Image (spheres, rainbow, N blue to C red):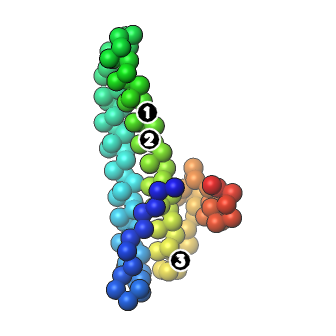
Amino acid sequence: MIMFEMPPPPGDVLTVTDLELRSDAAFARHMETYTTGSVLFAITTALPVDQDEQDGGELHAALVRVRAAVDDYRQATRRAWRDAYHRWADMAGVEVDDTALFPDLPTASDTVSGEGQ
């Protein structure tokens, strides 16, 4: 699992604002994966349909592997964003509806219990 932890603040005390900034940074990192994925998709689909040639086939296969890696990274950043958001929400006293905000991820309680791993 990819971790996106930030260094502790001076004095090891996190404020609600610190947690909000960390959540915002995690969200931005997650959203960047969509730009990367879009560019890779455009490149892959722009390749000629006939991939029988050695070079073209290898390039297509490499792009497919890279896109799969980006998809895995996207899921990791989404989980990191959810976790950072939950830390902020808990500290701020905000109720979070996981089924509405993160419908395709295991709930936070599943992740804590190990079921969502």
**Residue 107, above or below 36:** below
Residue ID for mark 3: 90
Q: Amino acid at mark 1?
A: Arg
Q: Quadrant of the C terminus?
A: bottom right
Name the secondary structure under disc 1: helix
Classed neighbour count for the residue bearing mark 3: other residues with Cα under 10 Å, few (<14), some (14–19), many (≥20):
some
Residue ID for mark 1: 65
Name the secondary structure under disc 2: helix
Going from N to C along the chain, the mark reached first, 2 or 3, is 2
**Separation of marks 2 and 1 at Cα, in angstroms:** 6 Å
**Percent x, y of residue 13:** 42, 87
7 or 25: which is nearer to us? 7
Classed neighbour count for the residue bearing mark 2: other residues with Cα under 10 Å, few (<14), some (14–19), many (≥20):
few
Q: Amino acid at mark 2?
A: Ala
24 left or right of 78? left
Q: Residue at x 34, y 24 (%)?
A: 59
**Percent x, y of residue 84:** 47, 68
Would residue 8 be visible to someone looking at this image?
yes
Q: Are marks 2 and 1 in contact (CB under 8 Å)?
A: yes
Q: Are marks 1 and 3 in contact (CB under 8 Å)?
A: no
92 or 3: which is nearer to us? 3
Residue ID for mark 2: 69
**Separation of marks 1 and 3 at Cα, in angstroms:** 38 Å
Going from N to C along the chain, the mark reached first, 1 or 3, is 1
Q: Amino acid at mark 3?
A: Asp
Q: Residue at x 62, y 61 (%)?
A: 111
Q: Are marks 2 and 3 in contact (CB under 8 Å)?
A: no
60 left or right of 2? left
**Residue 36, above or below 92:** above
**Percent x, y of residue 107:** 62, 60
Quadrant of the image occupied by residue 54: top left
